[in-house]
Image: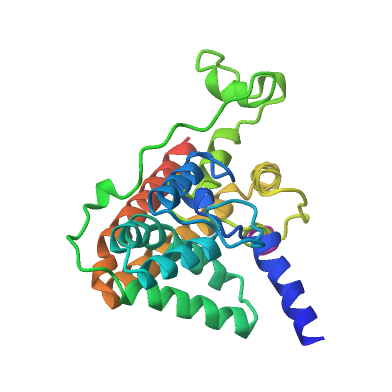
C-alpha cells in the first residue's frame, strides 16, 4: 500500500501538475519535445551518452535522465559535457522546478528527494567563471503559431478586435503567465485552483490555459480582477524572495537568481500595465 501511495503521489505531482522536463521551463513554447529538448539531445550526442536500455520517459530532457547523464559523465571523468549540463541546463531550470514542487507540498519521501537534489546541484558547482545573468537563457525559436486556431489572433496585430473569431482579451496575458521562461515561475493546476478558492469563484476545470483564462473571465464578471491580480503579484513576490534566499545561501547561484528575478519583475510590470484604466 505504501508503494501504491507513492505512485499515486507521483502522478499528482508530475503527471497532473509539474512536468519534470527542461523544455517546460526553458523553451518559449513551454512544451515538451521543443527546441530546448533538441539542445539537450545535442549535448548527449557530443558527450557520447545514451539513456540506458529500458528507461522510458516522455522526452530526453527529463530531470532523471539529465541527472543520470551528469553522474555518468562525472564517473567517466568527462568534465566538459558534465560542466555544460550542470551550469547551462540543470542549474538554470531545476531551481524554479523544485520551488514549484515544494509549493505542491509533496509526500515526505519526494520532499526529501527534492531538497537533496537542490542542495547537491547548488553545492557542487564546477570551478568555472561565473556566468553573466543575461547570457544564461539560450536563444531559441519563438513558439509556433498554428493557422486556423485562435492563436492566429495573436499574430494579427492589425486586427484591433481582441475577441474576434472567438478570441479572448486575456489570451496574450494568459500565454505569458503560463510560460516560465517569460514569467519567472511555473503556475500549476493547484496554484490556479487555489487562486479561485481564495476569491470564492466557481471551480474551474481543464488544462492550465483554460483554468487561468476562466479565472480572468470570472474575476472580470464578479468585479474581482484587482484581487486576482494582487494574488498573482503575491505569488511572483514569494518566488522572488525564494530566489534571493537561495542566492544568499548558495552565492554561486546568484547570476541564475538574477536571471529569474528579472523575469518576475517584468511580469509584475506587465500585470500593472495590462489593466491600467
Task: Tell me, yes or no, whether the highlighted magenta stretch contains residue 197.
Answer: yes
Residue 152 place in picture, x, y as percent: 61, 21
Task: Judge left or right: residue 67 versus residue 147.
Answer: left
Q: Which residue appears at 32% of the width and 56% of the height?
A: 84
In this view, the residue farthest toward the right is: 1
Residue 162 place in picture, x, y as percent: 60, 24
Relative to 70, is 149 above or below? Answer: above
Viewer can see residue 27 = no
Q: How is the image coloured?
A: rainbow
Image: magenta residue range: 195-199
Q: Which residue appears at 54% of the width and 73% of the height?
A: 102
Dominant secondary structure of the magenta stretch?
helix
Q: Which residue appears at 48% of the width and 42% of the height?
A: 38
Relative to 84, is 145 above or below? Answer: above
Q: Which residue appears at 76% of the width and 73% of the height?
A: 8
Residue 33 place in picture, x, y as percent: 58, 43
Amino acid at each position: 500500500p505504501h508503494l501504491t501511495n507513492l505512485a499515486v503521489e507521483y502522478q499528482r505531482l508530475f503527471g497532473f501538475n509539474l512536468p519534470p522536463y527542461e523544455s517546460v521551463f526553458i523553451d518559449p513554447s513551454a512544451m515538451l519535445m521543443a527546441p530546448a529538448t533538441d539542445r539537450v539531445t545535442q549535448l548527449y550526442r557530443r558527450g557520447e551518452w545514451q539513456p540506458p536500455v529500458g528507461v522510458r520517459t516522455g522526452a530526453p530532457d527529463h530531470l532523471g535522465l539529465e541527472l543520470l547523464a551528469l553522474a555518468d559523465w562525472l564517473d567517466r571523468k568527462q568534465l566538459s559535457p558534465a560542466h555544460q549540463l550542470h551550469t547551462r541546463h540543470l542549474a538554470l531550470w531545476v531551481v524554479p522546478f523544485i520551488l514549484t514542487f515544494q509549493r505542491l507540498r509533496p509526500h515526505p519521501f519526494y520532499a526529501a528527494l527534492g531538497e537533496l537534489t537542490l542542495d547537491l546541484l547548488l553545492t557542487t558547482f564546477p570551478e568555472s567563471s561565473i556566468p553573466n545573468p543575461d547570457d544564461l537563457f539560450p536563444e531559441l525559436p519563438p513558439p509556433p503559431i498554428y493557422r486556423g486556431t485562435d492563436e492566429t489572433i495573436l499574430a494579427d496585430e492589425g486586427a484591433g478586435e481582441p475577441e474576434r473569431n472567438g478570441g479572448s482579451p486575456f489570451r496574450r496575458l494568459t500565454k505569458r503567465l503560463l510560460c516560465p521562461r517569460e514569467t519567472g515561475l511555473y503556475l500549476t493546476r493547484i496554484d490556479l485552483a487555489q487562486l479561485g478558492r481564495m476569491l470564492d469563484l466557481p471551480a474551474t476545470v481543464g488544462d492550465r490555459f483554460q483554468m487561468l483564462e476562466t479565472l480572468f473571465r470570472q474575476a472580470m464578471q464578479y468585479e474581482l480582477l484587482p484581487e486576482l491580480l494582487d494574488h498573482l503579484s503575491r505569488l511572483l513576490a514569494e518566488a522572488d524572495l525564494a530566489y534571493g534566499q537561495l542566492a544568499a545561501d548558495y552565492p554561486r547561484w546568484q547570476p541564475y537568481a538574477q536571471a529569474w528575478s528579472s523575469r518576475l519583475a517584468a511580469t509584475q510590470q506587465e500585470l500593472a500595465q495590462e489593466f491600467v484604466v
